[in-house]
Image (cartoon, grey):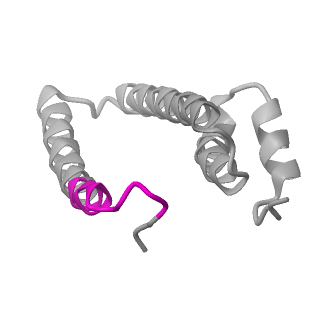
Amino acid sequence: MVSPVLDEGQLVGTLAAPCDIKTAAYTRTASMLAIVNARDRKVTREFFAEVAVQSVTLNETMRRAECLANVLVDMDANVLTRERVVACIDQLVAKADGIRQVLYAHMTQVAQCAMDGDSFH
């Protein structure tokens, strides 16, 4: 049996709570830790894929809600302009491209691993 490193009780407890914008960061963190926990527990590939899809979707959905909540704050403060939104989009796309490049490098290395049990470290 695998000994979990994560506090599974806290992880499950966080995920048991209904989604709320006030606790979105905790929910997003728990969604990502769920992937780590599933991997640590060595679940089947199919179950791992399901956990990963649901976790990433939850994380992305809550992040979108946080983003819209911030838009409301800026609207209320009357500081939201088209130029500011365009600048933010450009910055985010540039950041995403940097992340994509790192992920590409990782996957290039992973693709070189043998399929017979060898792993990349």
In reply to whether residue 106 is colored magenta, the answer given is yes
Left or right, 114 with respect to 62, comes to: left
Identify the residue shown where x is 22% and y is 61%: 105
Identify the residue shown where x is 68% and y is 39%: 23
In reply to whether residue 18 is colored magenta, the answer given is no
Residue 44 image point, x, y percent: 65, 38
Seen from the viewer's position, the closer of residues 3 and 32 is 3
Left or right, 52 with respect to 67, comes to: right
Identify the residue shown where x is 59% and y is 41%: 28
Identify the residue shown where x is 88% and y is 50%: 9
Asked if 58 appears above or below 42 in the picture, the reply is above
Residue 86 image point, x, y percent: 13, 33
Seen from the viewer's position, the closer of residues 101 and 64 is 101
> In the figure, residue 34 lies in which quadrant?
top right
Number of numbered callouts drawn: 0
Task: Locate the C terminus by quadrant.
Answer: bottom left
Q: Give the extent of the magenta segment.
A: 104-117
Identity of the residue furthest to the front in this view: 116
Residue 26 image point, x, y percent: 67, 46
Seen from the viewer's position, the closer of residues 86 and 78 is 86
Seen from the viewer's position, the closer of residues 64 and 14 is 14
